[in-house]
Amino acid sequence: MEGSRHKIILVDDNMTNLTLGRNMLKPFYEVYPAPSAAKVFEILENVRPDLILMDIEMPEMNGYEAIKKLKGDSRFADIPVIFLTAKSDESSELEGLDLGAVDYVSKPFSAPLLLKRISNHLLIKQQRNDLKDYADNLEKRVLEKTREVLNLQSAVLTTVADLVEFRDELTGSHISRTQRYLEVLVREIIYDGTYVDEIKTWDINFFLLSSQLHDVGKIAISDNILNKPGKLNEEEFEIMKTHVAIGVDAIKKIMSITDEHSFLKNALLVTETHHEKWDGSGYPAGLKGSDIPLEGRLMAVADVYDALITVRPYKEAYSHEESCRIIEDGAGTHFDPVIINAFKKAKEDFNDIYMAYKPKTAS
């Protein structure tokens, strides 16, 4: 079928050569003869050829000038060009190849030889196109698979976090709120230009998703302690503190049995360090200052704000204003002062988040 045949533009200012070349190629290809380089660009506006056979010695615009123009236009740069010329010196051939020609055939040429070279270069072009299509499809499949994995990871994280939260009706939506508080804090820190070098190494989506696991260890804490009305005694508090180690062990166990656990690295840091304090008085390791990973320092602010503003078994809810005062007073003792500066600028966003996701039992 004519329309399915490869298209070739044949360029030669000698009409005899143009006619002979066209007749030679016509049984095998769809041929577009061009008596000048300028005519090639007119044809290219309507035809996308698979290959161009181009004479070099032509008036007005020679073959070298024409190929420079072709390669400089992204629409035509990948069209293979074979030079046809009476020149036989090595420097001329090298010049043509340096400019982007795929081959160089000297006149007078053998018809079978020229046809074979055309066939070879069309095959190479087809293979290159097939490889590009394969690479594009592979990239698409990888992106689709990546989205599937991310969706699965998100679903697993959310489901596990919901199981923890389900045990305490009073703190309903705590995980959703703290995740959004963190997003606001990170945004403000980036805007201020603080800790940017560290944050830019993160996958922020992973960080926000993985923060849902910060209290996963509470799933192993007795309801008698977790939901005890009133303040915990010393022994009970020590048991409550073990939720950090339990959560860390659970996350490490998951990481040990899967190669794809990069999304859990942030979860591990947040879970392990969000109860540490800037002055070293926190738990479980008593880390101090910048020895506490930034992930944990951020989570500490989000977690404590939410604990203050909501009803807990051991306390009534504080107002937004009182919660903010307590948070701000903790700068340099409980919290990283730099993060508290960001909190001060974003605290009304915190209140908006709480109001949008407040527990059903809250008034």
Image (cartoon, rainbow, N blue to C red):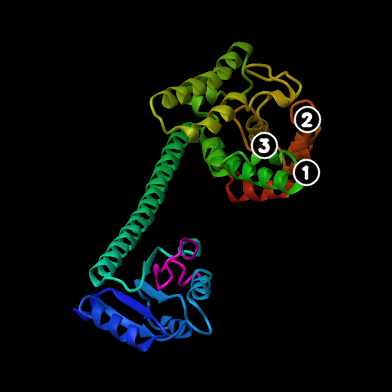
Q: Secondary structure at mark 1?
A: helix
Quadrant of the rendered structure where residue 131 is? bottom left
Rate crowding at label 3 as few (under 14), some (14 to 19) or many (20 or more) other CA atoms within 10 Å.
few
Residue 86 is covered by the magenta coloring: yes
Drawn side of residue 287 relative to residue 40, left or right: right
Rate crowding at label 1 as few (under 14), some (14 to 19) or many (20 or more) other CA atoms within 10 Å.
some
Residue under label 2:
330
Q: Amino acid at mark 1?
A: Lys
Quadrant of the rendered structure where residue 22 is? bottom left
* Mark 3 → mark 2, Cα distance in angstroms: 23 Å
Residue name at image x 74 percent, y 30 percent: 335
Front residue of this view, candidates 232 and 347: 347
Q: Secondary structure at mark 3?
A: helix
Rate crowding at label 2 as few (under 14), some (14 to 19) or many (20 or more) other CA atoms within 10 Å.
some
Q: Which mark is residue 250?
A: none
Residue 234 is covered by the magenta coloring: no
Residue under label 1:
344
* Mark 2 → mark 1, Cα distance in angstroms: 12 Å
Residue under label 3:
198
